[in-house]
Image (cartoon, helix red, strand yellow):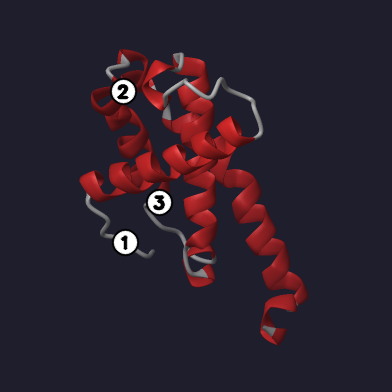
Amino acid sequence: MIELKIPNNTAVMLITERMKLEFEQRVKIKMYHSKATIFSLRYDELLELAEISACDLVFLLPAGIHYEKNNLGVILQKAISSLSKVFQCEEFNTYPMSRVNELLKPIHLLFKNSEKNNSFLNN
């Protein structure tokens, strides 16, 4: 098992910054009003941004991490739960590990399938 040592405050900062980038992109394509701020979003909208951001960050990790068991899910669950302090949204406190597993499952399957067909060897 690979034990990732990413401090919670670093993980929260990475997710928050990625959320801000995603929000700016959505403002550009007019999904949100140009005067809206990320802090004015409802919980469900923030949660969507947080989950998208978490997935983006997971894909940016070295591929080797995905081939072995690791504590990435625990890190993500703690970081998303900690967003309650950033956005003053208590609903984040109850973010379940099962939801993190649902987010990570397709990513793990993708890497597992790429390992089987050896397509990653040509990169």
Q: Distance from label 2 to label 3 (Cα)?
A: 23 Å
Which amino acid type corresponds to the residue marked 3 in the rendered image? Leu
Q: Distance from label 1 to label 3 (Cα)?
A: 8 Å
Q: Which residue appears at 49% of the width and 54% of the height?
A: 58
Q: Residues within 10 Å of mark 3 (few under 14, many from 20)?
A: some
Q: Position of residue 99 (x, y in %)?
A: 51, 30
Q: Earlier in the sequence, mark 1 or mark 2?
A: 1
What residue is shown with label 3? 72
Q: Which residue appears at 49% of the width and 30% of the height?
A: 98
Left or right, 63 with respect to 96, comes to right
- Circle 1 — which element? loop
Q: Position of residue 32 (x, y in %)?
A: 58, 22
Q: Nearer the viewer, mark 2 or mark 3?
A: 2
Q: Which numbered marker is on residue 3?
A: 1
Q: Nearer the viewer, mark 1 or mark 2?
A: 2
Which amino acid type corresponds to the residue marked 2 in the rendered image? Phe
Q: Earlier in the sequence, mark 1 or mark 3?
A: 1
Kindly indicate the quadrant of the structure image that contains residue 38: top left
What residue is shown with label 2? 87
Instruction: Name the residue nearer the viewer: 28 or 63.
Output: 28
Instruction: Name the residue nearer the viewer: 114 or 15.
Output: 15
Q: Is residue 27 above or below residue 15?
A: above
Q: Position of residue 50 (x, y in %)?
A: 46, 34
The quadrant of the image that shows the N terminus is bottom left
